[in-house]
Amino acid sequence: MDNKPNFSEYSHSELLDVIKHIDKNQYPERYQEVEAFLNNKEHLPEEKSEYNEIIEFDKYSTFWPRF
């Protein structure tokens, strides 16, 4: 039983980690799939917007304790 991961749900940083640690010889089709997701520009904007929201929240998270 070979459970294939759903790379479409991975974030950009997770995909970079996968491409760095995957065994290309044992899983060539998975390697190509991850490469395709990394090269796909439509996969990246979701993470950027989430990342920007986190930064915006963190920017003001220390205001009241300092005040």
Image: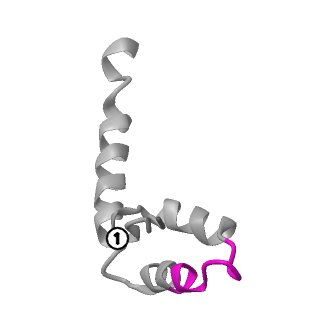
Mark 1 residue type: Ser
Position of 34 with respect to 22 (left or right) is left
Residue, x 36% and y 53% (percent of image)?
51
Can you tell which quarter of the image residue 18 is in? bottom right
Magenta stretch encompasses residue 47:
no
**Magenta region, residue range:** 23-32
Location of residue 64 in the rendering, given as x and y in whole percent from the top left corner: 31, 16
Q: How many marks?
A: 1
Q: Is residue 2 left or right of residue 62?
A: right
Q: Mark 1 points at which residue?
A: 8
Element under disc 1: helix
The answer to which quarter of the image holds residue 4 is bottom left
Is 20 in front, or is 3? 3
Q: In this view, does 31 lie above or below 59?
A: below
What scheme was used to colour the molecule? one colour
Residue at image coords 37%, 45%: 55
Instruction: Specify few, some or many for label 1: CA neighbours under 10 Å numbering under 14, 14-19, or 20 or more.
Output: few
28 inside magenta stretch: yes
